[in-house]
Amino acid sequence: MTTSLAVSTVIFALRPSETSDLKTVWIPLVRRIRDPYVGKWALPGGPLLSEEDLASAAARNLGETTGLDPQYLEQLYAFGGLNRSPGERVVSIVYWALVRSEEAARASEGENVRWFAADSLPPLAFDHNLIVEYALWRLRNKMEYSRIAHAFVGETFTLAQLREVHEAVLGRALDPANFRRTIEASQSVVATEQRLSGTKYRPPRLYRYNDAIDLADQGPLGPAYRSSRAPSPQQITPNPHPQERSTRQ
Amino acid sequence: MTTSLAVSTVIFALRPSETSDLKTVWIPLVRRIRDPYVGKWALPGGPLLSEEDLASAAARNLGETTGLDPQYLEQLYAFGGLNRSPGERVVSIVYWALVRSEEAARASEGENVRWFAADSLPPLAFDHNLIVEYALWRLRNKMEYSRIAHAFVGETFTLAQLREVHEAVLGRALDPANFRRTIEASQSVVATEQRLSGTKYRPPRLYRYNDAIDLADQGPLGPAYRSSRAPSPQQITPNPHPQERSTRQ
DNA sequence: GCGCTTTTGGTCAGAATGACTCTAAGATGG
DNA sequence: CCATCTTAGAGTCATTCTGACCAAAAGCGC
């Protein structure tokens, strides 16, 4: 029996929920058109090409099936059980990705690609229910100690928007004042001088991600994926006054 | 170019250090006898057989090369860069394992198998230095929030022994009183009525691992590896209600 | 201005943690 | 037997962190 190698990706985006007033976590799935599990929904994926590395394969698959460009991409796990696929031996290296809401709205949805609420999926092909469950667990875990929440929001954002991300992933409301306190203490954001206008109440301040602090949340492997976007040439002044804490941690 | 699939394992054991009075982390390496990197030291590993799952392959390799039986085995990462191995494309699924000190002492060491202090390795074959570095990072991280320390000690142990494990992995001394307080608060151990005799001072109480508390440190995947030791026959009820996640590996 | 909502700064109590002190219990040397 | 040594194990104290809660600030619509 020959063993084949595939790469799949669990793609997360936040969308308004029907049941709750909070946003919730959604993932796009593709309908299988080949024989094992024909007609069932499955994670987007495909074979690993011989001249691409694993993360590239995940990004390519993600783009081909959904048209999406992820803000974040990280390896989840390699699944290699013997009976994952009937009749053949497949080892799947699974990635998980985060896309912004606006980006997700642009995603091509059709007969064979559809979004599902991540916590109430139909029975999927292969062991994909377990895979999604594990990916969700990782997402919720990592939300607490890393800064992946920023991958769901734009360049600048209000603390309410960032809090909305945490609330959506954790599935419960957070105290605005306490959230502000902990985020500011973590120094993961820097305040801009701009405020968001057009609200019908007090205009909130806009914040920006703080690149200076890097939270080594993947250890020596570093960021598994750097966005394919151009490395922002508008940053003419890299650092006006070099912060004394630029090297800290 | 064809892509081959291999499984390797980073094996950790604690051993007395020459430089420090604390124990330190050691790993066994094997000397390469084939052409890419001949003579260099490398992680034990080999190809994935078609009829074994990933964890089994890791355990088999581990046993074949070192004769060791690990207390703990967990998947680390899948490495699939294009230039990991000159001339061929290899995707390596790497596991990490913990073995007890007594077990490690029994390990076969010879011309082609030798133990090294994990934080001062020679240049290894392939990208194995990076892999070990990442595995060490995971070990140190996981020591703080899970109970893997127990994999390094025996059935029963004193709190001083358990503290010695933490000190060895973290590389610094811990306050005995505070360590006791936090361990007892975590309820990860239960006190036995026995005490360790033969010491030249007050005999310390022996503790035992507390099975009742399960710390879901791998989420829905559950323990990646159940020891190959007899699967405790006192569990007469194998599976009361068939788990929906029976496909878990 | 008045009421509404959200932002944003604050207090307060309990939990967790690091540094440290002190007593208990056994072994050993005299 | 007794003083002494070493570690076990209990406790104290100050600091930090966190959740719950309060309240002022700042805009909008009326």
Image: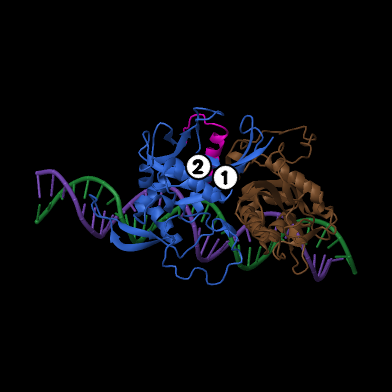
Chain colours: A brown, B blue, C purple, D green
What is the quadrant of residue B207 in the picture? bottom left
Numbered disc 2: secondary structure = strand
Would residue A101 be visible to someone looking at this image? yes
- Locate residue A110 relative to residue B179 in the image: left or right: right
Rendered location of residue B55, percent (x, y): 53, 50
Would residue A208 be visible to someone looking at this image? no
Separation of marks 1 and 2 at Cα, in angstroms: 16 Å
Q: Is residue B93 magenta?
A: no
Relative to A52, say whether B191 is above or below: below
Rendered location of residue A33, percent (x, y): 79, 56
Chain bearing mark 1: B
Rendered location of residue B97, percent (x, y): 48, 47
Instruction: Return the residue nearer the eye: A133 or A220.
Output: A133
Quarter holding the N terminus of chain B is: top right
- Residue hosting label 2: B10
For the record, the magenta segment spans: B119-138
Label disc, if present, on residue A22 of the rendered structure: none
Amino acid carrying label 1: it is Leu
- Locate residue B249 relative to residue A175 in the image: left or right: left
Write the residue at 77% across / 65% down.
A17
Q: Earlier in the sequence, mark 1 or mark 2?
A: 2
Rendered location of residue A13, percent (x, y): 75, 55
Instruction: Return the residue nearer the eye: A191 or A168.
Output: A168
Quarter holding the C terminus of chain B is: bottom right
Label disc, if present, on residue B48 of the rendered structure: 1
> Dot 2, crowdedness within 10 Å: few (<14), some or many (≥20)?
many
Q: Are tags 1 and 2 found on a single chain?
A: yes
Chain bearing mark 2: B
